[in-house]
Amino acid sequence: MTNTVYILNGPNLNLLGKRQPHIYGHVTLADVEAECTALAAELGVGVRFLQSNYEGQIIDWVHEAREDGAGIVINPAAFTHTSVAILDALNTFEGPVIEVHISNVHKRESFRHHSYVSLRADGVIAGCGTEGYSLGLRRVASLLNGAAK
């Protein structure tokens, strides 16, 4: 069995550090990937760090994780609030799933208060900035190692 954690990122996260830095900060997605890769080595897990602006690609990666992954950390971005298809794909995945949001979605527009992904997620981290990825990765590793749920 693999110990790879898929870290999946939705639309516009490729612009992290450039788009709305007053909300999302100045850290780039490449910076987040480097931090997660270093932390994964420390935690004894592998990572597959991916980003797409296309819903179908994210679904394909969830399907890939069914075969090759042990856990998923997902920041579905705007797909959080719209994608039953990503929820359905996540429901086919048997390992732990942690949902991450850089901003506190509950302090933003009302349409951001609903998450389809949360219906499957084993935990949700919101409003911790890009540190949420590290927190999510730590939680997945903890669940994989049999920590109390």
Image (cartoon, rainbow, N blue to C red):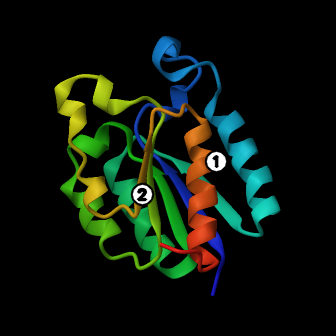
Residue at the (36%, 45%) spot, across then down:
54
Query: Is 33 on the left or on the right of 128, as rendered?
Result: right
Establish if 138 lies above or below 22.
below
Nearer the observer, 5 or 58: 5
- For disc 2, the neighbor class at 10 Å (few under 14, some 14 to 19, many from 20) is some
Residue at the (58%, 35%) spot, across then down:
130
Pinpoint residue 135: horizontal percent, then vertical percent: 60, 49
Residue 69 visible to an observer of this rendering: no
Mark 2 to mark 1 CA distance (whole Å)? 13 Å
Q: Earlier in the sequence, mark 2 or mark 1?
A: 2
Query: Is 38 on the left or on the right of 92, as rendered?
Result: right
Query: Is 86 on the left or on the right of 96, as rendered?
Result: left
Nearer the observer, 35 or 124: 124
Pinpoint residue 32: horizontal percent, then vertical percent: 66, 39
Residue projecting furthest to the front: 148
Amino acid type, label 1: Ser
Task: Indicate the quadrant where residue 122 lies.
Answer: bottom left
Label 2 residue SS: strand
Q: Quadrant of the N terminus?
A: bottom right
Establish if 9 lies above or below 130.
below
Q: Are marks 2 and 1 in contact (CB under 8 Å)?
A: no
Task: Indicate the quadrant where residue 82 lies.
Answer: top left
Residue corresponding to mark 2: 123
Nearer the observer, 87 or 144: 144
Residue at the (49%, 17%) spot, across then down:
19
Pinpoint residue 107: horizontal percent, then vertical percent: 31, 24
The circle drawn on residue 134 is 1
Establish if 128 lies above or below 56.
above
Amino acid type, label 2: Gly
Residue at the (57%, 65%) spot, across then down:
140
Residue 88 visible to an observer of this rendering: yes
